[in-house]
Structures are given as structure tokens and as C-alpha cells.
Amino acid sequence: MDFSIDNGDTLQEERKRLITGAWGMSEEDVRQALNAASQEGMTEFESIDIDKSGIIDVEGREQNGRELELSLRQGSFEVTQMDRD
């Protein structure tokens, strides 16, 4: 997923179909995960990944530069794990 840094518009969305079945995140999933991370204090986003079980990992930094890693459950976007370094 590529977003415009200026206005948040989607520039490109890509999902891959696997032999085991399609899985991944929609544009709305990405936006909700980033919103949940913002609510936990993340102001700079470095990466976002999802595994086959639906756990979304978001890595980034807080305003003070401190690293923040969050795990969220796809669908509910409930924070299941949080690490600050």
C-alpha cells in the first residue's frame, strides 16, 4: 500500500493471491491499523505487516523519537501487544 504523504490519498494498493488462499489487508484495514497506532502515540510509521492468523504488526516512533511496536488483531484492531524501546 502506498499513500500520499501530503494528503493521505491511496497511490497504489496490491494484494497477492496465494495457493493457500488469499489473505492480507485492505486499504481500510491499513488505515484503521495506522489510526489505532496513532491513538497509542505513534507519530512516525516505519512498517506494517500482517501474518496469516490476522495479527497486524506496526512499527514506528513516538513524537520523542522512542521506538514503538504494536500488534493488533485484524477486524477489531485491538492492541494485543505493545513494546516501547
Image (tube, rainbow, N blue to C red):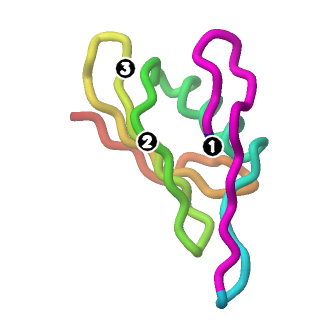
**Furthest residue toward front:** 12
Report helix, strand or loop for mark 3.
Answer: strand
Q: Which mark is residue 72?
A: none
Q: Nearer the viewer, residue 71 or 29?
A: 29
Q: Nearer the viewer, residue 62 or 24?
A: 24
Q: CA distance from mark 1 to mark 3?
A: 22 Å
Compared across the picture, whether 71 is left or right of 16 comes to: left
* Range of residues picked out in magenta: 2-18
- Rendering coords of residue 32 (x, y %): 70, 38
Q: Please name the residue shown 72% across and 76% down the image.
A: 22
**Furthest residue toward left:** 85
Q: Which mark is residue 1?
A: 1
**Would you say residue 16 sits in the magenta stretch?**
yes
Amino acid type of the residue tagged 1 in the rendering: Met
Q: Is residue 52 above or below residue 43?
A: below
Report helix, strand or loop for mark 1.
Answer: loop
- Rendering coords of residue 68 (x, y %): 34, 34
Amino acid type of the residue tagged 2 in the rendering: Ser
**Furthest residue toward bottom:** 20
Residue, disc 2? 47
Residue, disc 3? 62
Of label 3 and label 2, which has the lower sequence position?
A: 2
Amino acid type of the residue tagged 3 in the rendering: Glu
What is the quadrant of the N terminus in the image? top right
